Image: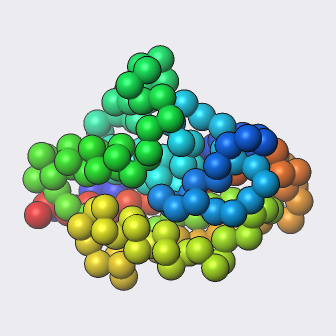
Amino acid sequence: MYRIGIGYDVHKLVEGRKCIIGGIEIPYEKGLLGHSDADVLLHAIMDAMLGALALGDIGKHFPDNDSSYKNIDSRILLEKVYALIKAEGYIINNIDAVVICEQPKLKDHIDQMRSVIAKLLQTDINNISVKATTTEKLGFEGRGEGIAAQAVVMVRKG
């Protein structure tokens, strides 16, 4: 049995924060603002995974008014979400995700992101697709105010 979920996340770019995307630190003058490390890509993937099994969203499982999640590494949260998926008897079939931003440029970091995500989700790297695109300077992403990510996840009975 297969199920599909979609996820979307946005975080504001600010000075004084690390830029964590896809479980790795990206060298950049600004970082993403959020209660956790604000890893926009992992957050979109988690929401897609939860959505595939109608388990709510990351705000339900990791509320931003809970101090135990303050500045938490999103890789830890992704492992927790994967544990929920496995508890339901599912595993990752494949993920297709896109990060939307003008800066920083991500092409040199994509394979490392894929590797980190594959390892955390106990799947082959060929099951993980991560892409990056711009908005041709349109919208908040184009103005460099924030970064968005979208993900589609297919899970299957394991």
Q: Position of residue 32 (x, y in %)?
A: 66, 44
Left or right, residue 140 beside residue 115: right
Answer above or below: position of 56 versus 147: above
Q: Is residue 120 visible?
A: yes
Task: Kindly identify the residue that appears in the image at 47 percent across and 17 percent down.
Answer: 65
Nearest the camera: 152 or 10? 10
Q: Position of residue 100 (x, y in %)?
A: 69, 59
Q: Position of residue 41 (x, y in %)?
A: 53, 55
Task: Kindly identify the residue that appears in the image at 64 percent across and 79 percent down.
Answer: 108
Task: Kindly identify the residue that appears in the image at 34 percent across and 56 percent down.
Answer: 4
Q: Position of residue 7 (x, y in %)?
A: 48, 49
Outermost residue, top side: 65
Left or right, residue 82 beside residue 150: left
Q: Quadrant of the N terminus?
A: bottom left
Answer above or below: position of 108 versus 35: below
Task: Kindly identify the residue that appears in the image at 39 percent across and 51 percent down.
Answer: 75
Q: Quadrant of the C terminus?
A: bottom left
